[in-house]
Structure formats: structure tokens, C-alpha cells
Image (tube, helix red, strand yellow):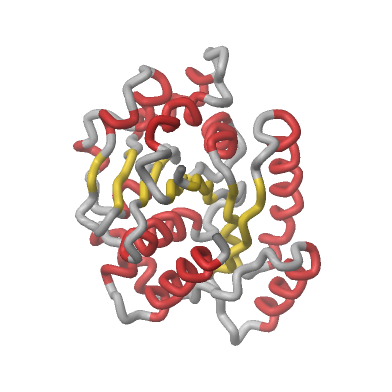
Amino acid sequence: MGKTVAIFNQKGGVGKTTTCVNMAAALGAKGKKTLLIDVDPQGNSTSGVGVDKSEVYASTYDMLINDTSARAIMIETEFKNLFLLPANMNLAGAELELGEKEDRNSVLKKAIASLRMEFDYIVIDCPPSLGLLSINALVASDTLIVPLQCEYYALEGLSQLVSTVRTIKQHYNEHLELEGVLFTMYDSRLKLTQQVIDEVNKYFPNKPYKTMIPRSVKIAEAPSFGQPVIYYEKYSKPSFAYKKFADEFLRAQ
């Protein structure tokens, strides 16, 4: 049975979607059949792998709200071993409609249950907030990876995130574990960067990945071409970093 990993941080702008897209693409490139699930209404993971959101006729909204099967909305991307359950703007209204469902916290888990045997890894892109979409993603997952920007405010959000995970474990998914913390937008020239890293290592020993994702204009450019950076600029620093991160993730399995 495939392992399901949520990429989640309640704070926006930390490289969450970039990590989702490139982790999933890197796992696929390494021969692992991978499913990327976009449950963020912004749909950036969807466009990040070259799928036009405006042309998606059925999305994760239909899967969660209209009981459309996951298989019916699945798209095989142009990238090796990478499949997608896409999102579009319809998902923005899903929070309210999910609230009316009796099993509102576990709709996603049930929807993808039949796919878990087909994939080596399932990677879920969560919204940057703790609403019903994120709760569904965390309930459906075995573990979560937290992308963390190397700046002071990231530390403030981390304690809130830990509290969130504890609540999910207590009430909805007792098996949920923190897989690891991935430092993003890393700049070794900044003194604050090392202070943040030291602080996180102190509170989460053995959880931060050794691989760090550097700041790079290539990461910002890649989505506009509908490609993960590991395909868009395969010899760039962020490309090597995400491939190295995927290797580190796989070694821990």
C-alpha cells in the first residue's frame, strides 16, 4: 500500500506548493509511481505540472462534494510516473459544503482509499490554513512534511502547527506522524538563517532534513512554464536540492 504524505504549513509563502510539485516529480523520476493531489483552491500544484485549471472539467471539488470517483478525475501528466488529481476554483466553496456532510473530516480519505494500492507515494498539497480541506488531507495521510522558511516568523507559526497536529492526532487520525521539516528559501549568508535552523533542531531533534532548498529565481520561473524546476532547469541548484531531498526522504522509508 502506498504511503500518503501531506505537505502542510498554516503559514503561506513558505514553498509548500513548490515542494509538493518537485517532491512528487522527483519521486516519479526515480521510478516511484506517484499521485499528486491538489486540495488547495488556488490550484497552483495543478498548473505547476502543466495542467490548465480552466480546462479541468472535473476536479477534487467534484470528488469531495459530488462523490465523483478519484479515478474519473485523475490526469496522467507529461512527467515520468506522475499522476494528478487536479483542483480548480470550484474548490473555494468546498469548505462550506463539506461542513454539511456527516463524515466531513474523512471524505478525502474515503475518496482515495481505492487508489492507495496503485501508487508508491501519494503527495497532498494542502491550503495554507486549518480549514476542513486541510483537516481532510491530514486525516487521509500517514505523515506530514512541513516546509519552513528560514526566517523569524516561521518559528512563530511552528508552535501553532504542532498544536494543530496534536489535535488531529487526538481526534481524527491517531497514526499521523511528523515525517520531517524541510528548510526552504535557504540563504547561508544570513545570520538569521542559522539561528532559525538551530532553534528548529533544538525543538525537533532528528526531524529537519539535511537537504535545504536554496532561494532561486529558477523556482519562481518554473511554474509559469508549467514544469517542476527539476525538469525546467535540471542542472540548477534548486533542481539538485529537490532531487537530493527526494533521495533523503526515500532513504528514511
Taking 54 as reference, is 183 left or right? right
Residue sitting at x 71%, y 55%: 158
Position of residue 38 in the picture relative to residue 133 (left or right): left
Name the residue at 49% across, 60% down.
Answer: 15
Q: Nearer the viewer, residue 101 or 141?
A: 141
The extreme bottom residue here reads: 189
Pick whichever, 159 or 121, lies toward us: 121
Instruction: Tell me where residue 152 appears, x and y as whole percent.
Output: 70, 66
Disc count in the image?
A: 0
x, y percentage for residue 126?
Answer: 50, 43
Residue 118 on image: x %, y %: 35, 41
Going 36% across and 17% down the picture, which residue do you hit? Answer: 66
Q: Is residue 26 left or right of residue 132?
A: left
- Image-quadrant location for residue 222: bottom left
- Is residue 195 shown above or below 28? below
Question: For the point 49% across and 47% down, which residue is it?
Answer: 3
Q: Residue 125 versus residue 74: which sits nearer the camera? A: 74
Query: Is 226 located above or below residue 2 in the figure?
Result: below
Question: The C terminus lies in which quarter of the figure?
Answer: bottom right
How far from the left and from the top, in percent, is residue 24?
39, 56
